[in-house]
Each structure stands twice: as C-alpha cells, then as structure tokens.
Image (tube, rainbow, N blue to C red):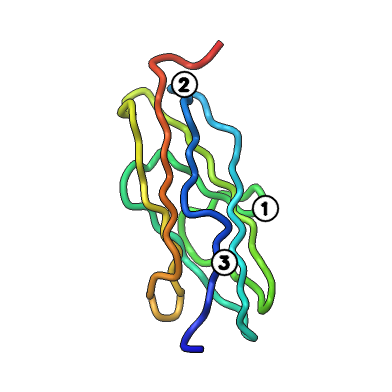
Amino acid sequence: MDGPFLKVSATVLDFGVVGRGDSSAPQLLRLTNSDDSPVEVTRSLAGDDHFLTSVDDVSWTTGSRTVPAHGSLLVQVRYSPGPGTALGARTLLSFHSASSGQPLSRILLAGMARQEPLP
C-alpha cells in the first residue's frame, strides 16, 4: 500500500435548519487508520466557515492530529451560522496527510440558516 489509508465514517453531513446565532448538535466523523503506522492529519474547509470541528471537545482549526496505527480518531462537527450567514451553506471538509499534504478524504457539509435563533 502506498502512503496512509484513512477511512471516514461519512461522505456527507447535513445539519438541516439551524437558527442564526445558534449552534447545531454535534455530528461525529470517525477517521480510521488501517495502516501499521500512525497518520498525522490536518484538516481544511473550502467554503462557508461556520462549520466548526473539534477533537475531545477542543477546537481544531489549525495544526494536526494523530490517528493511531490500526486505530481511530473521533471528530465532532457543528454548524453555527452567524448573523450574516447565507441561508444555505455548503462546505467541503478535507483531511490531508500532514507529511505530504495529499488529500486523504473529503466530506460535504451542508446546513440551512434560519433568520432568527429557534425559541
């Protein structure tokens, strides 16, 4: 096998309708490494920046995280539209090899912003 292999538990996360100023319940992505070596991964967002990622309840906006050999990493994703957020949001969340920069997987994130927060 050439390079790391990373399996992701979903290819699409749809957050439905979320009020502006609110935050959705987290949806979980499991990154699984089937390789004999740990994999350092970075993440990037292409599109709306109102999607938030965290690991162990710690925000993940920069840096890398380690997916252990034959292990997994659980990533929480939330949609948190602000006052100026477009009604419909789509973003591509990508995970990359920290050593080579090559993409390992991509997930489509989608959500709709409601005018006001839900009561």
Q: CA distance from mark 2 to mark 1?
A: 25 Å
Decide if residue 42 is on the left or right side of residue 66.
left
Give, as a three-letter code, the residue at label 3: Arg
Q: Which residue is mark 3?
A: 65
Give, as a three-letter code, the residue at label 1: Asp
Mark 1, other Cα within 10 Å: few <14 / some 14–19 / many ≥20: few
Decide if residue 46 is on the left or right side of residue 62.
left
The picture places residue 6, in percent across and down from the top left corner, at 54, 71
Question: On the rendered image, what quadrant is the C terminus found in?
Answer: top right
Q: Circle 1 sits in a helix, a strand or a loop, which is it?
A: loop
Q: Which residue is mark 1?
A: 56
Q: CA distance from mark 3 to mark 1?
A: 11 Å
The picture places residue 34, in percent across and down from the top left corner, at 62, 77
The picture places residue 55, in percent across and down from the top left corner, at 62, 54
Residue at point 30%, 28% (across, down): 86
Q: Circle 2 sits in a helix, a strand or a loop, which is it?
A: strand
Q: Which residue is mark 2?
A: 19
Give, as a three-letter code, the residue at label 2: Gly
Residue at point 51%, 80% (across, down): 4
Q: Can you say whether 8 is above or below 79 in the image?
A: below
Mark 3, other Cα within 10 Å: few <14 / some 14–19 / many ≥20: some
Tags 3 and 1 in contact by the CB under 8 Å rule?
Answer: no
Badge 2 or badge 3: first in the primary sequence: 2
Q: Circle 3 sits in a helix, a strand or a loop, which is it?
A: strand
Q: Can you say whether 47 is above or below 97 in the image?
A: above
Q: Quadrant of residue 90?
A: top left
Q: CA distance from mark 2 to mark 3?
A: 31 Å
Mark 2, other Cα within 10 Å: few <14 / some 14–19 / many ≥20: many
From the viewer's perspective, is the residue at label 2 or at label 1 nearer? 2
Residue at point 66%, 74% (across, down): 68
From the viewer's perspective, is the residue at label 2 or at label 3 nearer? 2
